[in-house]
Amino acid sequence: MSSATGHGTGDIAVGSLLLASPALLDPNFVDTVVLLLDVNDEGALGVVLNRPSALPVSEVLGEWGDVVDEPEVLFQGGPVSTDGALAVALASPDGLDSAGFKAMWGRIGLLDLDTPRELVDGTVDRLRIFAGYAGWGAGQLQAEVAEGSWYVVPGLVDDVFAGEVPDLRRQVLRRQPGDLAMHATRPADPELN
């Protein structure tokens, strides 16, 4: 796994969060918080944590709707492969080696939704399902961080399964050291201040 350091921020690594800076104007990522799930020499992959849809998981994936954390909806994980789903799970302490689970960062990993649900019962403490993902080619994310489009900060398990989804970006910014915390109170349009 390779890593790079952004301007006064953390390493680009699995488990890191990307916080969209005010300079990032791409509508797919304005005000987003992205959890990095894979980082290597070929690029990076993550999911947007703070874009819940209105579509209940149970309408698309049946019984998985009974397992996901609140809100029990699909999340818009990013603009790539939006017809597919990634299930991000927190394995129970005894569930790290369970069928269909691939650890990515601590007890956080991806759960294969083709795994029979009865094999998953008791092995997953928390679950969130994302339609699509965010992806970057080799060197692309590092270049975006260097140009100031993203703040890179350490992630916490609670960020992945946050209950207050709309306020997640501000919450993560508030706990950062130094000047970065001030961005939590920055208005969307500073000229309206």
Image (cartoon, rainbow, N blue to C red):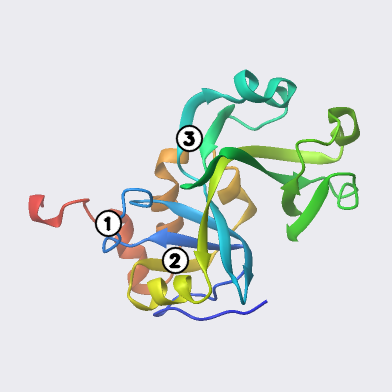
Between disc 1 and disc 2, the foreground one is 1
Q: In front here: 125 or 140?
A: 140
Residue 185 quadrant:
bottom left
Residue 147 is situated, as x and y percent measured from the top left of the image, at 33, 76
Identify the residue at horizontal 47%, vertical 31% (top origin). 53
Q: Is residue 78 above or below residue 61?
A: below
C-alpha distance separating marks 1 and 2? 22 Å
Residue at point 67%, 31% (across, down):
68
- What secondary structure is marked by label 2? loop
Q: Quadrant of the N terminus?
A: bottom right
Crowding at mark 2 (Cα within 10 Å: few <14, some 14-19, many 20+): some
Residue 101 coordinates in the image, percent (x, y): 81, 48
**Other-residue count near label 3 (Cα within 10 Å), few / some / many at <14 / 14–19 / ≥20:** many
147 over 46 or under it: above or below: below
Q: Which residue is mark 1?
A: 25
Kindly indicate whether the residue at mark 2 contacts the one at mark 1 (C-beta within 8 angstroms): no
Q: Please name whichever residue, 38 or 13, is drawn nearer the observer in this view of the structure.
A: 38
Tell which circle, 3 or 2, labels the residue nearer the N-terminal end. Answer: 3
Does residue 127 appear left or right of residue 180 in this picture? right
Q: Secondary structure at mark 3?
A: strand
The secondary structure type at the circle numbered 1 is: loop
What residue sits right under mark 3 in the picture?
A: 52
94 vs 172, left or right, is right
Q: Report, in whole angstroms, how far the alpha carbon at label 3 lies from the one at label 2.
A: 24 Å
Q: Are marks 3 and 1 in contact (CB under 8 Å)?
A: no
Number of dots carrying numbers: 3
| Residue displayed at 42% across by 60% down | 19
Marks 3, 2: nearer the viewer:
3
Q: Which mark is residue 176?
A: 2
Percent x, y for residue 193? 10, 52
User: Label 1 amino acid?
Assistant: Leu
Q: Is 139 displayed left or right of 57 in the figure?
A: left
